[in-house]
Amino acid sequence: MGKHDKREGWLNFNVSLPPGFDSPRLILKAVDYIERELADLVDLYFEQANVFSAIVGIFGAKALNAVSNWEKNPNIHKAQQRFPDLRRRGCASPPMPHECLESKGSKRPWAIQSHYDHSGWYIIWRYLVDPTRSLERHKAVIIWRVDVVFLEKIDWKYEKSSAGETGGGRTHTFGVKDVATKLRGKAVYLRPDVAIRGGKPIVTNGHSGKK
């Protein structure tokens, strides 16, 4: 990240961040790490997009473990439950909700889904796969928005499984109620050269970030 990184203009310094996040600038370091590490995994996206989203969240947690005062959850039992992915360094065990941070990747512009309805901080890495490298010549995976939000248990709604005896469907999940409203003003990082069209992020004309 250069001294005069133009991406600092893509940061929102007014977004509330988890305790100990000294500056949203560390998000840029995490974005760099995720985009770099995912470069060799693009084929997986076209094979299993849901698995790819999970990997985005995993790399997001690894990045924050390295650049922030949040660490990967050392509790094996909790780690197996996948919540929280990270906890604030030095906090008591078990951590309080404001000391819990879940890292999620999503190719969708608004949805937040989880297998649990826990209270805590959530960071969502919104990504797109750009095999034509329309945005960045050397990047096939782009993090175009990063949302940071504190969610209470009451913010979640149960979404029952669509699987049945005849097969098919997905397992049950929890989704955030009125998520677009909940995320309004929560984007700590937002690329101006990506827009939502038809419910999906696309590269906009005339604002290429290619270099």
Image (tube, rainbow, N blue to C red):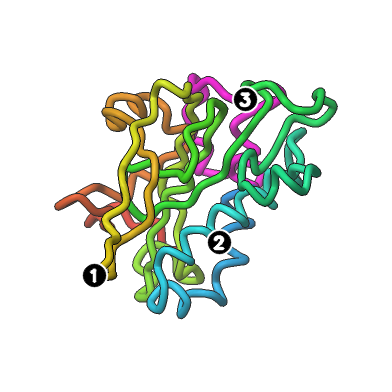
**Which mark is drawn over residue 55?**
2
Label 3 is placed on what type of residue? Pro
What span is in magenta?
1-29
Tag 1, which secondary structure? Answer: loop
Query: Viewer-nearest of labels 3 and 1?
Result: 1
Vertical relation: 202 (above or below) 165: above
Label 1 is placed on what type of residue? Thr
Q: Badge 1: few (under 14), some or many (20 or more) residues near its Cα, within 10 Å?
A: few
Label 2 is placed on what type of residue? Ile
**Which mark is drawn over residue 166?**
1
Q: Badge 3: few (under 14), some or many (20 or more) residues near its Cα, within 10 Å?
A: many
Q: Position of residue 173 (x, y in %)?
A: 39, 46
- Residue at 57% across / 50% down in the picture? 31
Vertical relation: 82 (above or below) 164: above
- Residue at 49% across / 39% down in the picture? 116
Q: Position of residue 97 (x, y in %)?
A: 62, 23
Q: Is residue 1 visible?
A: no
- Of marks 3 and 1, which one's residue comes earlier in the chain? 3
